[in-house]
Amino acid sequence: MSLSTTTAARWVDRWERQQRRYAIDREERFTVIADVVEHVTAGRSRPVVVDLGCGPGSLAVRLTRRLPRAHVVAVDMDPVLLAMARALGPGLVRYVDAVIGTEGWTSALGVEGQLDAAVSTTALHYLPHETLQRVYGELAGILRPGGVVVNADHLLPEDAADIAAHVGRSRAGRRRDFSHEDWDTWWRAAERDPELTDLFAERRRRLTRLTGGGNNGLSLDRHATMLRRAGFAQAGPVWQVGGSCVLVAVR
């Protein structure tokens, strides 16, 4: 199901503003992710990067601008968001329609043995604990030695979590990030767009077959433990404001 560039651009622009409610200092977070990928791929002529839960391509497109020689593969299961991404970035990113954590999902990426970095932003908290542990293990299996997982998400520390959350909310309030429309408003409005009718019908069919969703509630410390258990030599935060965190694990 194709989508016009004009319609995709309109909804992605609203998506970008809506997401500021949920990712504190969102642009800086994107920049930090790119900093990490640039660092670990220095000297590699054609680095390979996978964006997990790519949505409409926000992170994937930014990575291609920062690292124009990189081969970026982006994966998601949402037909609405994938259609928007494909309409706006033809040729820049290879978009893969797959459900992260299901059987064979890594094979669909086509990057086994050559992957330099697996990145994600505000997506992996949807995976249940057991599924995420398996995904971390599968990523360890397809990353090259020295490769990284970069998970940017809502990751609060176990100690002083309530204070960290308050600091994040306060910063977002000063930046007026809560003045933008919220997640539910964006989805309800998009569903009324006639050009998206068929895509939303497909989305509803897919969601009825899925389990899980919501927030797995895992702390920053728990993610780091899970990554080490999956085979990563190092795992720790490299940037954090409130609950907005960039966690890096090195294979």
Image: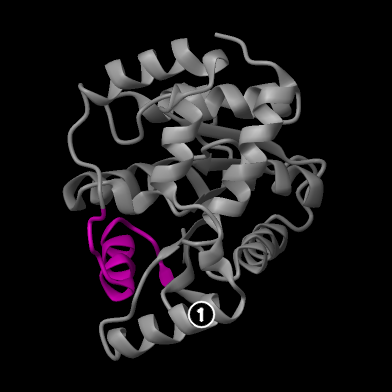
Judge whether residue 133 can be spotted in this image.
yes
Q: Residue at x 44, y 86 (%)?
A: 167
Q: Position of residue 161 (x, y in %)?
A: 30, 84
Considering only vertical position in the picture, is 77 above or below 128? above
Decide: few, some or many residues near mark 1? Use Cα within 10 Å; few <14, some 14-19, many ≥20. Answer: many
Relative image position of residue 39 (x, y in whole percent): 70, 64
Question: How does the figure colour the protein chain or chains?
Answer: one colour
Q: Which residues are magenta?
A: 215-235
> Badge 1 is on which residue?
241
Q: How many marks?
A: 1
Depicted 99 relative to depicted 69: above or below: above
Whether the magenta-drawn stretch holds residue 41 is answered as no
Does 72 appear above or below 149? above
- Residue 114: image quadrant is top right
Q: Position of residue 15 (x, y in %)?
A: 57, 44
Horizontally, is 50 left or right of 159 in the view?
right
Residue 109 seen anywhere in this rendered image of the structure: no
Considering depth in this image, is 20 or 151 the residue closer to the camera?
Answer: 20
Which of these two is toward me, 3 or 185? 185
Left or right of 188 in this view: 171: right
Q: Is residue 222 magenta?
A: yes
Q: In the figure, residue 202 lies in which quadrant?
A: top left
Q: Residue at 25% of width from left, 51% of height from top?
A: 133
Give the structural element (helix, strand or loop) at label 1: strand
Give amino acid for label 1: Val
| Quarter where residue 162 is shown | bottom left
Query: What x and y, as percent, mark residue 165?
Result: 37, 80
Instruction: Decide if residue 161 is on the left or right side of residue 94.
Output: left
Residue 70 vs residue 77, the one in the foreground: 77
Q: Residue at x 69, y 63 (%)?
A: 31
Specify the quadrant that holds the N terminus: top right
